[in-house]
């Protein structure tokens, strides 16, 4: 039933040394719930969130490559978490959506021309007989800076966004659900970015990856 959500792919290359090292501490003596929670925190806080570093090539989205970096886009961190989960025998898949941020968006709006991020990467995990969603994108340090409680996840219920910050101000909302994917849909990611940020896409078209400075 879950073969396609457990299998190794070019992107979810969980037998690679880089991913194996990441999941080494989650041994067979732990239950799946502890593995889900522990690996989530490791990915959430181990790689700083950076929405301004974007890639359009297969190699850019390979988990073993992402694992060597210090910061990553939301899609990158979702891929890394999925690869680790599959390496631990836990079914998981990628989910993509369009979201909007309402706090500390000055740079986003300046560089992207919008406070919307599309596509935004999430993870769906199958645990205790059901699919649940989570977002390991926003590291604790970033959340503390913007006065937002960091998201936790134990596999029992959705944990996808902080709707309000600690001052009860609107922080984030989901605008559109693009669906679930057993593997990384590179063409869809590229096309969605082009549709939402046509000027930026035209500026960087042909480059393997770019940092929006």
Image: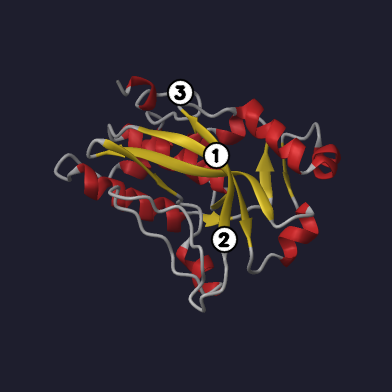
Inspect this view and state whether residue 68 appears.
Answer: no
- Above or below — where is 9 with respect to 130? above
Res 9 label: 3
Residue at the far bottom in the pictured view: 167
Q: Residue at x 40, y 53 (%)?
A: 159
Give the number of the mark in front: 2 or 3.
Answer: 2
Whole-angstrom CA distance, mark 1 to mark 3, is 18 Å
Give the colour scheme shown: secondary structure
Residue 17 quadrant: top left
163 on left or right of 209:
left
> Is 115 or 84 nearer to us in this picture?
115
Residue 102 quadrant: bottom right
- For label 1, the crowd category at 10 Å Cα-Cα, with few meaning under 14, some 14 to 19 and many 20 or more, is many
Which secondary structure lies at badge 3? loop
Q: Residue at x 41, y 60 (%)?
A: 151
Label pair 2/3, CB-CB below 8 angstroms: no
Which secondary structure lies at badge 1? strand
- Above or below — where is 110 with respect to 59? below
46 on left or right of 71:
left
Whole-angstrom CA distance, mark 2 to mark 1, is 15 Å
- Above or below — where is 21 with respect to 151? above
Q: Residue at label 2? A: 172
152 on left or right of 174:
left
x and y percentages locating residue 147 in the rendered image: 52, 75
Q: Quadrant of the C terminus?
A: bottom right
Whole-angstrom CA distance, mark 2 to mark 3, is 32 Å
Give the number of the mark in front: 1 or 3.
Answer: 1
Q: Residue at label 1? A: 96
């Amino acid at each position: 039933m879950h073969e396609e959500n457990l299998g190794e792919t070019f992107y979810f290359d969980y037998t690679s040394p880089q991913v194996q090292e990441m999941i080494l501490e989650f041994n067979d003596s732990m239950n799946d719930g502890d593995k889900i929670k522990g690996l989530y925190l490791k990915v959430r806080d181990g790689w700083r969130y950076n929405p301004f570093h974007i890639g359009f090539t297969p190699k850019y989205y390979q988990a073993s490559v992402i694992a060597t970096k210090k910061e990553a886009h939301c899609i990158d961190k979702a891929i890394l978490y999925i690869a680790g989960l599959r390496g631990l025998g836990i079914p998981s898949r990628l989910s993509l959506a369009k979201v909007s941020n309402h706090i500390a968006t000055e740079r986003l709006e300046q560089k992207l021309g919008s406070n919307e991020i599309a596509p935004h990467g999430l993870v769906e995990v199958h645990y205790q007989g059901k699919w649940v969603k989570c977002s390991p994108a926003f590291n604790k340090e970033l959340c503390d800076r913007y006065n937002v409680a960091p998201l936790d996840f134990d596999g029992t219920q959705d944990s996808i966004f902080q709707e309000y910050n600690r001052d009860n101000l609107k922080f984030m909302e989901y605008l559109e659900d693009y669906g679930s994917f057993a593997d990384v849909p590179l063409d869809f990611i590229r096309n969605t970015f082009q549709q939402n940020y046509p000027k930026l896409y035209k500026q960087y078209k042909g480059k393997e990856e770019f940092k929006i400075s």
